[in-house]
Structure formats: structure tokens, C-alpha cells
Amino acid sequence: MNPIRVLSIIGTRPEAVKMAPVLLCLSRNAGIESRVCATAQHRQMLDQILNRFGLAPDIDLDAMRPGQSLGQLAATLFSGLEAVLQDPRPDWILAQGDTSTVLVAALSSYYHRIRFGHVEAGLRTGDKWNPFPEEAHRRMAGLVADLHFAPTEGARQNLLHEHIPESRILVTGSTEIDTLRLVAGQPASAEETEWLNRCGLLEEGRLLVLATVHRREHFGLPLESICRSLRCLAEAYRSRIRLVFPMHLNPHVQEPARRFLGGTENILLLPPLDYLSMIHLMKRAALLLSDSGGLQEAACALGVPMLVLREITERPEGVLAGKARLVGTDPARILSEACRLLDDPEARAAMTAAAHPYGDGHAAERIVAALLEESARLHEPFHPARRDLPA
Ligand code: UD1
């Protein structure tokens, strides 16, 4: 059988983090001709992660423009992908999650009648505005996907409720856990250790509290509320904590972060961190406050107590397991929950139990095996027959 052609499309930092193990697994399989298209919806933050895993895209659409609207971004991505999907024509397109890149990859696959595999399928909050625009993106990607790689049984159930045939869904575990497994044993490099030392993070007796925020539905007042509560927390625990805040490059995050958090002695504002540096920081953290989905899974797996700065989550598993708490953006709630955990080591310890619900770190292997199996079943690896796709 000829190798099957798989084109993986990635655009942002979290997609690179979660697709890295899949890309590595695809590239090592003799039955697969793997190509990677980076839309570069994120530029610096994407490159940082790709470099870390020694991955070089075959195609780079270089789509990032400062301050572009969602519509402008989608238009750039649609026209950029046109030529990429035609020559050579892939048998499968893979994309992960719910960014603009994923929506456009899914819809472009459909227009070109190319099979689409959705990694991290089935995450839902049920509220189309929250997270915005990710909930709508992933639902639309799910509508056109041919294979749905669900990270958890809960995600599979969501897809079944949407009448996705059972045979199209595979529970794989989250690829974030694969990535963690890949980097878990890697020590901090000399450069990172020096950087951590310079920040005073390795030597101080103070507890490390790590915080990140980036979601669009938080831009404006909710983000200001979050920053205000982080500042109050740092001031209230001046001698006991050091609050580290790696800033997303989005100007809507940078501006309020600098305005509210800059100039406080025990708050350290950092540029976006390389994945391994972030993991090293998380391992040292007594507490993580974040609105990030990927970090929610990583924190669970690493046993770092986490306060989820969101009103609703598409990852209920960690919350149900008692490893994360959903606290929203109300400053009083954030402060009281953070203080409770900082004051009570036993409450923190209760959130650090070893088992976690996001998989065993072998999701990428399952995804690649499923692609091969499905392609063998279809017997037409190179040019998918129109008869098994809708006319
Ligand atoms: C995007 C995704 C979101 C994901 C997040 C992870 C969409 C609509 N949103 O949000 O789902 O959780 O990435 O980070 O797809 N910028 C840079 N350099 C970079 C990256 C971003 O300067 O390397 C700045 C630019 O000003 C850019 C802005 O950030 O215009 C926003 O980037 P964008 O990709 O539109 O959205 P995110 O908020 O990052």
C-alpha cells in the first residue's frame, strides 16, 4: 500500500504543544507521508514551541498580523490554504482544538472533499459565547470531521449527543499528556536554570503562585477584575508569595497586565515562556490561577492545585476530580479561594492526588493507528473516493 498523505495544520502555541507528539509519531511511521502546515496565526509563540520539539513546518502561511479581526484572520487562512490542499492533495487533514486555524482547516477540508481528523474533539460548554469564539469553532469542526479523537469519555458522550456515529469517535486521552510525558524527564537547561535563578525563583522561601490569562471573553472588565484580584493577593501575601505572570502577546492582555500588576515588588511579569520553562515553573508552583484549557490538563497531571479563572469549563473532569476549582472572574471569589488554599496546606495537598482524568500519554499513537486503520479500510489511500463522501 502506498503511504497515506497526512497534512497537519497548526496555528497557535497550544496547537503546537498538543500536536507535537502527533507530528513526531506521524513522521516516524513508514506508512505515512507527513507534512506540516503552520498558518502562523501566532508567530513568536508558535516558533518557540516548534523549535523546542525540533519541528520545522513544510509550509508556513505566516498569517499573523498585529490586531487583525477574526474575520480578517479567517479570510487570510482560507485563501492561504487553497493552494496547500491541492498540490499534493492530502488523504487526511488533521487539526487540533478550536482556534480560527482549526475552523478554517476543517471547512477547507470539507470544501476540497478531503477527510478531516479532529484532535481534541467533543469538548463543549454548551454556551456558544463561552469560550468565544472557540465553542462555535469546535462545534463546526465537529460537523465536518470524519474521525473524532476525543480526549475523554465525557467528550465522547458530547459527540454522541450530537448524533455523531459511534464508529467515528475514538477516546484517545489528551495529547497534552503525551507532550508532558515527552518533556517530563528533561531537566531545565543551563540557560533556563540561570533564568530561574535570576528571577529569584529557585532560592526564595516564598511560595510560587503562577498566573496566566488570555481568553477573548475576558478582554476588558473581566480581565481587569482578574488583574486587580491578583494584585490584591500579592499585596496581602507580600512576604509569603511571589506571583509570576507570563504575559500572552495579545495587546489586550499586555496593557491591563502592565497597568495593574507592574511595579509590585513580589509580582514578576514575564514574556511568554517556552513550554519546558512553563512546566518547570508549574512544578514549583504552590498554586496556579489561569483561564487556559491546556494548563488545566497539565496542572491536573502534575498535581498543581489550580483555580480556573472562568465561569464555565469544557473540561469538567479535573474539577469533578477535585483537582481544580472553577472560580470565575469575580475578585472577591478569586481572593477568598486563593487565600483559603494558601493558608491551608492540607487543602492544597487534597488537590494534588496522583491520578488524573486526561489520559495515559499515548494518545498520539492511538490517533496515528486509527488513521492507518481507517485508510486501510477505505482501500483508497491516495485519492479518497467521492462515493464515501457526501456528493
Ligand atoms: C488564540 C486562539 C485561542 C487560543 C489562544 C492561545 C483564536 C480565535 N483564538 O487566541 O483559541 O486559546 O490563541 O494562545 O483562534 N500575538 C503576537 N505574537 C504571537 C501571538 C499573538 O504578537 O506570537 C498578538 C498579535 O497582536 C495578535 C494577537 O496577539 O493579533 C491575537 O492573536 P490571535 O491569534 O488573534 O488570538 P489569541 O488571543 O492569541
Image: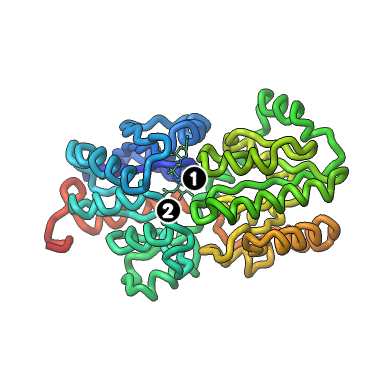
For the residue pair 38 and 303, the one nearer the viewer reads as 38
Measuring 66% from the left and 62% from the top, which residue is drawn there? 330
Q: CA distance from mark 2 to mark 1?
A: 9 Å
The quarter of the picture where residue 198 lies is top right
Residue 362 in view in this figure: no
The residue at label 1 has a CB less than 8 Å from ligand 1: yes
Left/right of residue 164 with respect to residue 389 in the rendered view: right
Measuring 30% from the left and 59% from the top, which residue is drawn there? 145
Left/right of residue 270 with respect to residue 347 in the rendered view: left
For the residue pair 197 and 23, the one nearer the viewer reads as 197
The quarter of the picture where residue 80 lies is top left
Task: Identify the residue position indicated by label 2 in the image.
Answer: 97
Task: Identify the residue position indicated by label 1 in the image.
Answer: 14
Q: What colour scheme governs how the chains and residues are painted in the rendered image of this protein?
A: rainbow
For the residue pair 212 and 20, the one nearer the viewer reads as 212
Mark 1 secondary-structure assignment: helix
The answer to whether the residue labelled 2 contacts the one labelled 1, judged by CB atoms less than 8 Å apart, is: yes
Measuring 44% from the left and 50% from the top, which residue is drawn there? 365
Q: Earlier in the sequence, mark 2 or mark 1?
A: 1
